Amino acid sequence: MSAPRQRPPRLVQGLRSAAFNLGMYALSAVICIALLPLLAGPRRWGPVAGRIWSRPHLCPPGLTCGLDHRVLGLDRLPPGPCIVAPKHQSTWETMALYALIERRVVVLKRELTWIPLFGWFLRRAGSIAVDRKAGPKALRAMLREADDRVSDQAARIVIFPEGTRTPVGASAPYHPGIAALYGHLDLPVVPVALNSGLFWSRRTFIKWPGTITVEFLEPIPPGLRREAFMATLRERLETETARLVAAAETGGK
């Protein structure tokens, strides 16, 4: 077992993080402007734009912050439609999943689609925008759109069970949207454990050096009762995420 990596002085890493943030926003703006012609094309061009946008964002952190990543278990994704349920600790995975998962459609809050340029591409990529204040009406709309994406694109529906970023070690309720999708679509669910919050934490400016680990877990087959499904999903996600966090904190694998 190797020793955990020593963190650099906070001031030094703060300057590196500032350089990364400036580069990230500038790169996003340039890519969005360059890809504007894709907005006039067919819907299938939207996911292509998402991958082009996200891939470069996985490189600058290593150059400016000393932040790297590794992906385990990607071969556990079924070749056809499925539901992907990642743990949510950081902004990092909201970018990375666009590059890692082909034919993905992300369930996200409606407000993100209002961002100029960026929001236009989210809509064109087929993202399922949810109005959190609409209650049952929003849930029914989400299921209709998920049906459309699965039938039209053989999509992999990505939804964060917690609905928002949760600090490392914290426990948050799993929202009913994931259970509704599971029961309605009758598809396998692939949990995704990660430890991104150790390095790029919620509402924190500094990105710390290290290696983010993302692990796609064994799919949960369709057909379970709601209570059994939610218990299985939570147990797998929380247990494996805790394992990845502990390994990173101690320098293990």
Image: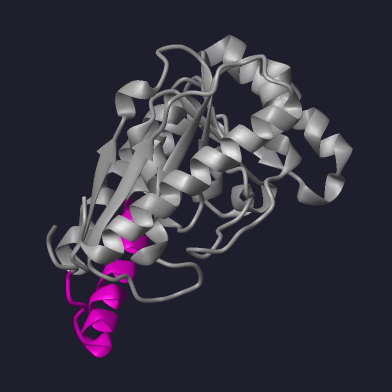
Residue 203 located left or right of residue 163 = left
Identify the residue at image location x=43%, y=49%. Answer: 241
Please tell me which residue lies in front, 21 or 70. 70
**Image quadrant of residue 64?**
bottom left
Q: Is residue 72 above or below residue 144?
A: below
Identify the residue at image location x=66%, y=17%. Answer: 148
As for residue 13 lying within the magenta part, the answer is yes
Q: Position of residue 37 (x, y in %)?
A: 41, 33
Please tell me which residue lies in front, 152 or 91. 91
Q: How is the image coloured?
A: one colour
Query: Magenta residues: mostly which secondary structure?
Result: helix
Please tell me which residue lies in front, 243 or 131. 243
The answer, for residue 86, to whether it is visible in the render is: no
Residues in magenta, as a range:
5-30
Identify the residue at image location x=64%, y=49%. Answer: 163
Residue 111 located left or right of residue 155 = right
Identify the residue at image location x=61%, y=47%. Answer: 113
The answer, for residue 49, to whether it is visible in the render is: yes
Residue 110 located left or right of residue 117 = right
Q: Position of residue 125 (x, y in %)?
A: 51, 32
